Amino acid sequence: MLIAASPCSAAEIHFGDYGRVYINGKEYRSGLTAIYSVFSFSNRFFVSGLIDKEGSDSYFIKEINPENGTSVSLPQENKISQFYELKNNLYAVRDERQIIKLEDNQRILEKEIKPRSHVIQPEPLIACTWGQDTLDSRHRLDPVCYSPDLGWQKDVFWTTTAVEPKICHGQLKVLVSYHRKHALHWEILVMSPESGEEMGHIPTSEPTLGMDVCNYELEK
């Protein structure tokens, strides 16, 4: 049985420039130079990002108290790119191969994953890693979508991290790009979440802000 990743709770939280965080429409200063992810969990508000001091980056998770604007900082070894909730627990995804469980301001290693992973579904785990689109093959990364729990892996060139892969109506959809005749082309690759088997391709134009892969369907 496939279980979709739990979204944020009813509280609205998002981030802007210069380390600003907005909780239910009110602005807070996180103290971070850059923010990677925000998440509302059990009436608590979490932000991940970095502080750049004289060219040296330090990574943090911060829990913001919306009542007084104060925050508690949890130093991190590297970038936290994503939060998600599963079975009333909060998890954080590290860029460098790990998912950690956050418990009472403690970090517990949950499992090893591939570098640069974005978790699409936590149980059974399905994730995609992002790539870097370049005509120079020497600098191309080798991104994949994979499920260690279900035992499949497929080369998938997901490059635009602003458009997240999603599972919609029993299909895994990922925006991919490829070069043909010296031009960049885009399409949505559709796969089976259970097996990773390719189900088809949906041609699309260049991605736009707010694009949702779930709004595109295979032709019947």
Image (spheres, helix red, strand yellow):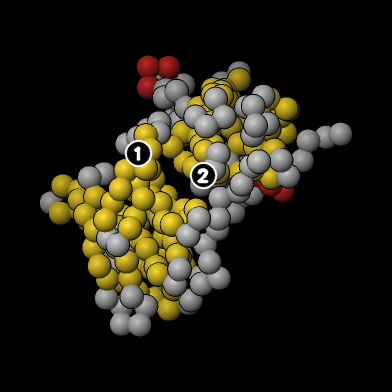
Q: Residue under circle 1?
A: 98
Q: Earlier in the sequence, mark 2 or mark 1?
A: 1
Residue on which disc 2 sits: 122
Image position of 144 (left or right of 72): right
Q: Please tell me whether residue 101 is drawn above or below residue 70 in the rendered image.
A: above
Q: Position of residue 63 (x, y in %)?
A: 32, 66
Is 216 in front, or is 178? 216
- Residue at image coords 55%, 25%: 151
Residue 14 is situated, as x and y percent measured from the top left of the image, at: 46, 65
Between 60 and 126, the one lying in front of the other is 126
Which residue lies at the image location 65% right of the left edge and 32% below the top edge?
Answer: 194
Q: Amino acid at mark 1?
A: Gln
Residue reaching furthest bottom? 67
Residue 197 at x, y percent in the picture? 67, 24
Mark 1 secondary-structure assignment: strand
Give how far apart the Cα atoms at labels 2 and 1 are: 13 Å
